Structures are given as structure tokens and as C-alpha cells.
Image (cartoon, coloured by chain):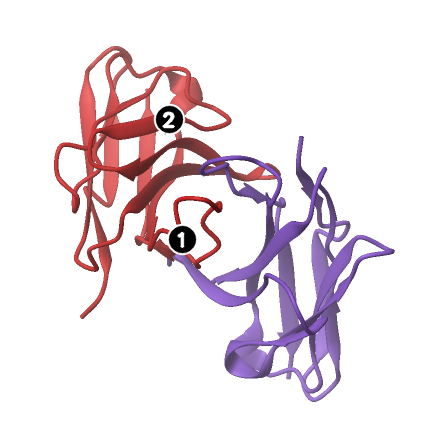
Chain colours: A red, B purple
Amino acid sequence: EAQVTQNPRYLITVTGKKLTVTCSQNMNHEYMSWYRQDPGLGLRQIYYSMNVEVTDKGDVPEGYKVSRKEKRNFPLILESPSPNQTSLYFCASSRAASSSLPPYNEQFFGPGTRLTVL
Amino acid sequence: AQSVAQPEDQVNVAEGNPLTVKCTYSVSGNPYLFWYVQYPNRGLQFLLKYITGDNLVKGSYGFEAEFNKSQTSFHLKKPSALVSDSALYFCAVRDHMNSGYSTLTFGKGTMLLVSP
């Protein structure tokens, strides 16, 4: 089954304790992305990756890191989490369009990770 | 900069009636437009997209959307609502003029409630 998986699904942690949320897709997609969803703000993009070893900042990258060492995995790293990073996080992937055009293929989303930072 | 507005936080409709969920956008070039749906405790699911061509786009579960360039709108519609359509709906836009892989900007979402 084609899918995007995230782990953990729920996480409660304390300020300053480093954590990693994993994301994996089995569709051989080039493009992967992380979003956070907050009430009244919709989804905001944190980071995205065009392919292995290629990442770029989205709209709200502060306090987050990512890596793309393998095509299927795109972990989100919070080096020193703070309470304002309490949110619902989604990973997504899609096929890439041609190199001369922005990607317009639909994204497949993971089930979400609910993070609470105390 | 690109942006999306969903002016209604919530839309209420009776089952069997037509529904419309509104979306307007702002981009510097031509837009790529998307609708996604989020059911409770689930990730977002793709409904439909407008890239180019026919202004009326048909998507999953009987939904359709009409691209209106002059009004910069991309409203989501369905002729006859079902209770199971109750969910959170997101409109999203990507600017065709941006080089490389630009970000996808989402609206704040509109909760659709269909009553029996």
C-alpha cells in the first residue's frame, strides 16, 4: 500500500530535550515536505526537500532541522524544543514535475504527529 | 508573495443540498490550485487540482471546483451534500512564476458540517 508513515504519532516532551520525528514514504517520491498545523493558522510549511541531499526552508523553519540522506526518509529534528512548537505536524511527499517547472503533483500526507512541549 | 483566503471558518448545509466552500488566492503569476480534505484524526487527502485548461475541475467524491481568473477564486462545490462530507477543507496555491520548487501555501481551512 502506498503510504507516508510518521513516528511517533503522539509525543509529550519537555523544553530543551532534543527529539526527532521520522517520516518515510514508499512511493519513490522525489519531493518531501514538513508542515505544522495550528488552529486558525492552517498548514504552514517548515522545510521541504526536492531530492536526496537537497533541502530548503519553508515559511516557518526557525527551531527545526531536517535531513534527506535517503530518498524515502525525511526526519524532522527539534534540537531544543520550546512550548511554541506544540503543534500537529504532517509530513508529505509527491512526485517531482520536470526540472524546469515547479511541482504541481498532489501531495500525499502522513497521519500526523501531535507534539506537546511542556 | 502568494496567499490564500478561505473567508468562512465554517459552512453548514443540510444533506442533499448543494454546498460551496469559498477560496480566493493571490499570486504574481499563474496559479496552481488545490483542494484537500482532512477527516478527524487523519492526514490531508487530495481532492482536486487546477493547473491549466478547463476552468471546471472535477475531483474525488463528487466534488468539483471552478477556477475564475478575473475574481481570483477557486470555490469548491458539490451538487448534493452527504453527512460523510463533514470535514475540514483546505485550499492551497503554488505560484507558477516561482522558479524551482516553491512552497505550497495553504488557507486556514473551512469546517464543513452537513446535517442529516
Residue B47, image x, y percentages: 51, 68
- Residue B17: which quarter of the image? bottom right
Badge nearest the viewer, 2 or 1: 1
Residue A99, image x, y percentages: 39, 44
- Left or right, A87 with reference to A6: right
Secondary structure beneath dot 1 equals loop
Residue at image x 24%, y 35%?
A11
- Residue B23: which quarter of the image? bottom right
Secondary structure beneath dot 2 equals strand
Determine the chain carrying the residue at label 1: A
Residue A1, image x, y percentages: 18, 70
* Crowd around label 1: few <14 · some 14–19 · many ≥20 (10 Å): some
User: Which of the two residues, B54 or B105, is positioned nearer the viewer here?
Assistant: B54
User: Which of the two residues, A103 or B84, is positioned nearer the viewer here?
Assistant: A103
A101, above or below B14, in the image:
above
Residue A116, image x, y percentages: 33, 29
* Residue corresponding to mark 1: A97
Residue ranking furthest to the front = A100
Q: Of the residues shown, which amino acid type is indicated by label 2?
A: Asp
* Residue corresponding to mark 2: A56
B99, above or below B11, in the image:
above
Q: Are marks 2 and 1 on the same chain?
A: yes
